[in-house]
Image (tube, grey):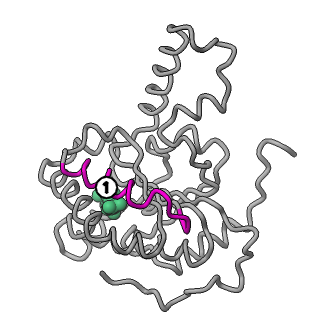
């Protein structure tokens, strides 16, 4: 896999370490369009997208960002042509198998969020293995949202809480934001400070609906496979210009 590890390896001088986002989330949009522009089949865009994600993960680690979350497959993505869905499932499995050793060496903790039970069994096995193997790693928390939908996540949390109330182990007045969060797929993961979406679309597309209540959003026209360290640097500069008020004045 190609990476540009030598380029911008250390935090660029115009970025302030103490103002970096702790947690960056990405909607990796535009793989299909990128491939089409190159005269290639759509799947080549996804393959190239993996290289981009891999380099972004390494870049976050190099620059001291402690968490990266990527939207790899939404609950709506099942509606794509069957061969593309099959290709993506196979790609996730292959990438996980191939990259596990490097993730261990680089002290990356990988986890998956979403309705994982609906994924192919072989992929579920690879997911469990990678999560178990890296669970104590400390350098960066890398979360992959797969078969993920924000509304579905909220609904399943509501159901789990309602069942506890019905069973008499929880009182309705005990339902706080903290308790609710502890029933989301992302329990234990801090909310993203910055969400980056590539390829120009200005929507959340059912991604981290609860978690993005106060997160900053950065949208670029760049297609995901072209989102390199320089583009990320630009996104972080824009983020550092913003004043985060969390509802205060
Ligand atoms: C959106 O582009 C991209 C996806 C649905 C797939 C993204 C997945 C990866 C980059 C692989 C990640 C792999 C691992 C193991 C984490 P699109 O197809 O919607 O592009 P378009 O809008 O141009 O059609």
Whether label 1 lies within 8 Å of ligand 1 gets the answer no
- Residue 23 image position (x, y, % from top left): 60, 59
Q: Quadrant of residue 103?
A: bottom left
Residue 220 colored in magenta in the image: no
Quadrant of the frame with the N terminus = bottom left
Camera-side residue of 246 and 175: 175
Q: Would you place residue 74 above or below residue 33 in this image?
A: above
Residue underneath mark 1: 129
For the magenta stretch, what is the residue range?
A: 122-140
- Residue 129 image position (x, y, % from top left): 31, 55
Q: Main secondary structure of the magenta part?
A: helix
Which residue is painted at 60% across and 14% down in the image?
170
Question: How many numbered callouts?
Answer: 1
Which residue is painted at 38% across and 60% down in the image?
133
* Residue 197 shows in this picture: no
- Residue 182 image position (x, y, % from top left): 57, 34
Looking at the image, the residue that sits furthest to the bottom is 6
Q: Is residue 76 left or right of residue 208?
A: left
Q: Would you place residue 174 above or below residue 59 in this image?
A: above
Camera-side residue of 156 and 214: 156
* The quarter of the picture showing ligand 1: bottom left
- Residue 92 image position (x, y, % from top left): 26, 59
* Residue 232 shows in this picture: yes
Which residue is painted at 47% across and 39% down in the image?
185
């Amino acid at each position: 896999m190609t990476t540009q590890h030598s380029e911008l390896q250390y935090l660029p001088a115009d970025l302030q370490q103490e103002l970096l986002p702790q947690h960056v989330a990405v909607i990796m949009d535009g793989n299909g369009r990128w491939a089409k522009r190159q005269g290639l089949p759509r799947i080549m865009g996804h393959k190239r997208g993996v290289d981009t994600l891999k380099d972004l993960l390494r870049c976050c680690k190099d620059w001291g960002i402690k968490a990266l979350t990527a939207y790899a497959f939404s609950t709506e993505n099942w509606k794509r042509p069957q061969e593309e869905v099959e290709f993506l499932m196979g790609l996730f499995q292959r990438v996980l198998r191939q990259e596990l050793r490097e993730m261990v060496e680089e002290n990356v903790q990988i986890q998956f969020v979403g309705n994982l039970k609906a994924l192919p069994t072989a992929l579920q096995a690879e997911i469990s293995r990678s999560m178990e193997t890296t669970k104590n790693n400390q350098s960066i928390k890398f979360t992959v949202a797969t078969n993920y939908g924000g509304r579905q996540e909220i609904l399943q949390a509501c159901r789990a809480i309602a069942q506890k109330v019905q069973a008499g182990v929880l009182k309705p007045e005990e339902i706080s934001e903290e308790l609710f969060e502890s029933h989301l797929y992302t329990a234990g993961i801090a909310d993203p400070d910055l969400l980056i979406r590539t390829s120009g679309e200005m929507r959340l597309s059912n991604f981290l609906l609860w978690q993005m209540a106060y997160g900053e959003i950065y949208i670029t026209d760049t297609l995901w496979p072209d989102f390199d360290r320089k583009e990320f640097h630009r996104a972080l500069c824009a983020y550092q210009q913003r004043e985060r008020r969390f509802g205060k004045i």
